[in-house]
Image: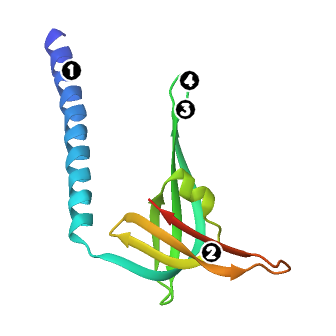
Amino acid sequence: MGAFIQIFIAIVFLVVAGGIVYGVFSGVRTWSSNNATAVLTLYSTVVTKRTEVSGGSGDSRATTMYYATFEFDNRERVELNVGGQMYGMLVEQDRGMLTYQGTRFKHFERDIQPQSGQTGTRSGQFHM
C-alpha cells in the first residue's frame, strides 16, 4: 500500500509540474509570436463585446477578462483582449482605426460621428 501512495503522489506531482511548464511555454510562444507580427492599423467596427469571469467561489477572488470583436471592411473579424477601462469606453457599432499586433490590442481611435438628434459630436482616442 505504501508503494501505491508514493507512485500516486509522484504522478500528481508530474501532472501539476507538466501543467505549469506547459503554461509557461505557451505564454512565451504567444508573446514571441505577437512580437514577430507586424503592427497593423485598420479601419474597423466594434461588432460585439464579452466578458469571461473565472474564480470567485468561496474565499477566492474573481478575475474578469474583457474582449471586443472588431470587423474590418473585408468582413474579417478579430477578437482581442482589452482592458476593463477600454471595455467600458467601447460601444457596439463604434467605427474607427484599430491598431493591434497579433493577438495584442494596442489602440482604438473612434471616428468623430454626429449623434442623431444632438448637436454635439462624439470622439475618443483610446490607448492600452
Dot 3 amino acid type: Gly
CA distance separating discs 2 and 1: 53 Å
Residue 62 percent coordinates (x, y): 53, 35
Q: Earlier in the sequence, mark 2 or mark 1?
A: 1
> Mark 2 = which residue?
94
> Mark 4 = which residue?
58
Circle 3 crowding by C-alpha within 10 Å: few under 14, some 14–19, many from 20: few
CA distance separating discs 1 and 4: 26 Å
Residue 25 percent coordinates (x, y): 19, 49
Query: Of helix, strand and loop, which one carries label 2?
Result: loop
Of labels 1 and 3, the one closer to you: 3
Q: Tell me what residue is drawn at x 21 percent, y 53 percent.
A: 28
> In front here: 97 or 118?
118
- Whether residues under marks 4 and 3 lie with C-beta atoms below 8 angstroms apart, the answer is no
- Whether residues under marks 1 and 3 lie with C-beta atoms below 8 angstroms apart, the answer is no
> Mark 3 = which residue?
56
Q: Is residue 21 above or below residue 123?
A: above
> Mark 1 = which residue?
9
Residue 115 percent coordinates (x, y): 77, 78
